[in-house]
Amino acid sequence: MTVILWLTIAILSAAILVGMFRVATAPDAASRAVVGDLVFFSAIGIIAVIGLVNESAVSVDATLIASVLGILATVALARILTRGRR
């Protein structure tokens, strides 16, 4: 089980590295925003998996709070990019 969790961390880390490269080469702000969300939620996934490995309840709370804040940030950025149009 531990091997699977460490493999999951490695895959999420690879997603973060590819995402950081894509943020640097993205043509417009909307693409950067989407890739930024990918990087953020991959990092949250890493925190959650590390919490599973260490059997820590605090990491679950941190993951839930970060997820809610990430969703709110995504909605706010979408409103900014569309200039408030619905």
Image (cartoon, grey):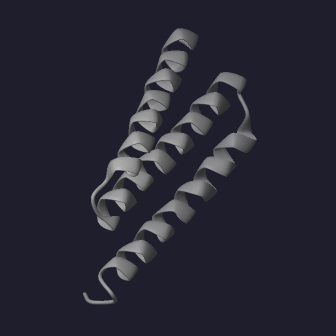
Q: Is residue 53 left or right of residue 30?
A: right
Q: Residue at x 55, y 17 (%)?
A: 6
- 70 in relation to 79, above or below: above
Q: Residue at x 56, y 64 (%)?
A: 69
- Name the spot of residue 58 as percent of width and height, x first: 74, 43
- 78 in relation to 41, above or below: below
Please state which of residues 12 and 48 is positioned toward the viewer in this rendering: 12
- Name the spot of residue 75 as percent of width and height, x first: 41, 73
Q: Residue at x 39, y 35 (%)?
A: 18
- 68 in relation to 25, above or below: below
Which of the 4 image quarters holds residue 21?
top left
Please state which of residues 70 and 57 is positioned toward the viewer in this rendering: 70
Q: Is residue 13 left or right of residue 79?
A: right
Q: Residue at x 43, y 54 (%)?
A: 36
- 18 in relation to 9, above or below: below
- Quadrant where the C terminus sits is bottom left
Which of the 4 image quarters holds residue 2?
top right
Q: Is residue 14 left or right of residue 62?
A: left
- The count of marks equals 0
Q: Is residue 60 left or right of residue 56?
A: left
